């Protein structure tokens, strides 16, 4: 379930009112550089997101935070990012707080020669930072979820599925749906606006459940009511 949640957060990251209108232009430029341009952008953004998630989780372990403490911090952050998605005033404040980082990344992006695959890959790395005022809450939610794990392997799985959601949008638009998107921008923007508070509510509820450790109660209830064959199957996975 966590992996599906991470994938959904990745999808929502780019189906965003301030990213979606610009994305077809970015992908058109990528395709002019090479037919593999969207792949290079997707790989760059994926590496950026996965690295950030692993860095945050590894840093927590390195400074001596226990798994429980790290999980509690992650739960609080998830609640915070849920509120950012739900409350326009918080969203505006987050955008202002991250504007400086995004501006510096945008300056670096202007210096990149995006006529090559290498340039598109580097561009993908930087675009994640440039779009941080918009994508930060969903990315932060995924990182908070990743921090719930007891090892970096779990965090890597969460961030990989988040990156897969991001890449799905990039590749779908780059290789098939760009024309349809351009014709239906109003509909896509409406979907993005409606999906934002839904994801915010999910982040908020999941964060609260993790903070108060309600998932342990859910697990205990399931173990008491699941048939033995299903328990054996889930353990074998």
Image: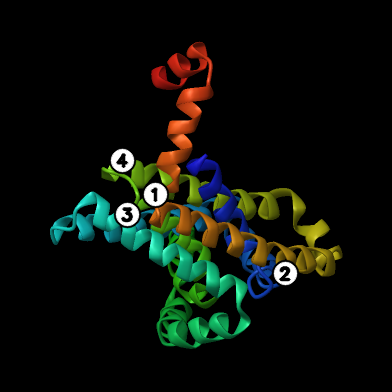
Task: Tell me the distance, in whole angstroms, between the alpha carbons under discs 3 and 4.
Answer: 15 Å
> Measured from the top left, where is residue 65 in percent x and y?
18, 58
> Measured from the top left, where is residue 187 in percent x and y?
83, 64
Q: Is residue 90 above or below residue 204?
A: below
Q: Residue at x 66, y 61 (%)?
A: 198
Asked if labels 3 and 1 touch by Cβ distance under 8 angstroms, the answer is no
Asked if labels 3 and 2 touch by Cβ distance under 8 angstroms, the answer is no
Q: Nearer the viewer, residue 24 or 149?
A: 149
Q: Is residue 191 visible?
A: yes
Dot 4 crowding, Cα within 10 Å, few <14, some 14–19, many 20+: few
Q: Earlier in the sequence, mark 1 or mark 3?
A: 3
Label of residue 158 in the image: none
Where is the C terminus found, in terms of image quarters? top left
Q: Earlier in the sequence, mark 1 or mark 2?
A: 2
In this rendering, position of residue 148 left or right of residue 98: left
Which residue is tagged 1?
213
Task: Tell me the distance, in whole angstroms, between the alpha carbons under discs 1 and 3.
Answer: 10 Å
Q: Residue at x 50, y 11 (%)?
A: 229
Q: Is residue 30 visible?
A: no
Which residue is tagged 2?
193
Mark 1 or mark 2, whichever is nearer to me: 1
Which residue is tagged 4?
153
> Measured from the top left, where is residue 128 in percent x and y?
47, 67
Q: Secondary structure at mark 1?
A: loop
Dot 2 crowding, Cα within 10 Å, few <14, some 14–19, many 20+: some
Q: Earlier in the sequence, mark 2 or mark 3?
A: 3
Q: Nearer the viewer, residue 221 or 38?
A: 221
Asked if labels 2 and 4 touch by Cβ distance under 8 angstroms, the answer is no
In this rendering, position of residue 17 left or right of residue 106: right
Task: Tell me the distance, in whole angstroms, between the alpha carbons under discs 4 and 2.
Answer: 33 Å
Task: Tell me the distance, in whole angstroms, between the alpha carbons under discs 1 and 2.
Answer: 31 Å
């Amino acid at each position: 379930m966590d992996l599906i949640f991470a994938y959904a957060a990745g999808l929502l990251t780019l189906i965003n009112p301030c990213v979606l209108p610009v994305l077809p232009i970015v992908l058109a430029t990528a395709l002019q550089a090479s037919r593999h341009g969207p792949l290079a952008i997707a790989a760059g953004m994926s590496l950026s997101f996965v690295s950030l998630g692993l860095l945050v989780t590894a840093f927590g372990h390195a400074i001596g935070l226990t798994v429980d403490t790290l999980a509690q911090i992650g739960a609080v952050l998830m609640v915070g990012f849920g509120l950012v998605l739900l409350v326009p005033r918080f969203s505006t404040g987050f955008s202002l707080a991250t504007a400086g980082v995004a501006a510096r990344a945008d300056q670096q992006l202007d210096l990149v020669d995006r006529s090559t695959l290498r340039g598109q890959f580097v561009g993908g790395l930087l675009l994640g930072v440039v779009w941080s005022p918009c994508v930060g809450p969903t990315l932060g939610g995924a990182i908070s979820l990743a921090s719930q794990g007891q090892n970096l392997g779990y965090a890597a799985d969460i961030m990989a599925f988040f990156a897969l959601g991001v890449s799905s949008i990039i590749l779908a638009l780059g290789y098939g749906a760009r024309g349809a998107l351009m014709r239906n921008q109003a509909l896509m923007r409406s979907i993005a606006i409606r999906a934002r508070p839904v994801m915010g509510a999910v982040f908020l509820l999941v964060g609260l459940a993790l903070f108060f450790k309600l998932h342990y109660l859910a697990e205990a209830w399931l173990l008491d009511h699941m048939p033995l064959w299903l328990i054996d199957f889930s353990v074998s996975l």
